[in-house]
Image (cartoon, helix red, strand yellow):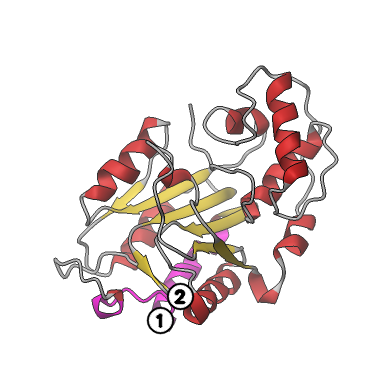
Amino acid sequence: MSNYPLLFHSNHLPSVGVLQKLLNRGGARLTVDGNFGHRTRQAVIDFQRLRRLRTDGIVGVETWPRVSAGANLPILDCVDVFDPLLVEDTETPIRRVGGNPRVIGGMCNGVAQAVAMILAASPGNVFLLRFHGHGDSGDASVSTGRGELDPNLRERGDIWNDPGIIRTLARLAPIFGPYGCIQFMHCQTGRGTQGRQLLSTIASSLGVPATAAVNDQAGLGSGNLPFGYTGPTVTAVPFGGTLAGWARSLPEFPQMSAA
């Protein structure tokens, strides 16, 4: 097994654009736009049937390693485990499938600590960087060392759109490859004007699309939550671009066999 993104019908994500490119190298003729619509779902089912996988149209722990075979698409996770529930719900499932999440919790200056850990762990050419923790509109929690979980995240000092924090986060720009994207798996981080502004700032600072959930993240079933979104998302593309335009610009993967 290996780390993976969970992708399914109705997702609108940069990682779906990468999936569409991967399916096209196997013979599908999809419009690459980041929209997991009916044609993409059917292409996934055709791919699964040919390889005797479960034909559910969902790209997960079984299908992702097969569809991405031969492509260098590293996935990194950073988990704020200050809330012990995130150990059980996020860190443990990621490790179970072979991932090696960077874990923070209770540290002072948590964003800088997280960035340093990610830089040290990065293999380069990163496809997907996911941050996991609690969130609110325009906020994604990272421990600040206060020793408390305040429901008002703005009072905890972990506001990602602070200029100093954005400059720190921008140090991650070199780790990404041509398919690179970033996801905030927290609840509600992408909600409203504040959420969109945060994602736009991060996307332009790192040079990769940034995505976050709009609503609370409900469970997808045991072990699935860390790997995908359970509801609507919003994505910002660097410098005001569109998801479809970014997806179309992705380089092609070499053709693959039916193995």
Mark 1 and mark 2 residues within 8 Å of each other at the beta carbon: yes
Residue placed most toward the observer, 39 or 168 = 39
- Is residue 21 visible in the rendered image? The answer is no
Q: Is residue 99 magenta?
A: no
Numbered tag placed on residue 166 in the rendering:
2
Taking 242 as reference, is 34 above or below it?
above
Amino acid at circle 2: Ile
Residue that numbered label 1 is attached to:
162
**Lateral position of residue 251 relative to residue 70, left or right:** right
Work out whether residue 137 can be spotted.
Answer: yes
Residue 238 x/y as whole percent:
65, 71
Q: Which residues are magenta?
A: 154-174
Report if residue 169 lies within the magenta region. yes
Q: Amino acid at mark 1?
A: Asp
Q: Is label 1 in a helix, a strand or a loop?
A: loop
Q: Position of residue 185 (x, y in %)?
A: 44, 56
* Image location of residue 183, percent across then percent down: 50, 57
Residue 3 lies, with reference to residue 11, above or below; the image says above
Determine the secondary structure under disc 2.
helix
Counting from the top left corner in percent of width and height, residue 219 is at: 39, 46
Position of 14 with respect to 97 (left or right) is right
What is the tally of numbered marks visible in this picture? 2
Q: Residue at x 22, y 63 (%)?
A: 107
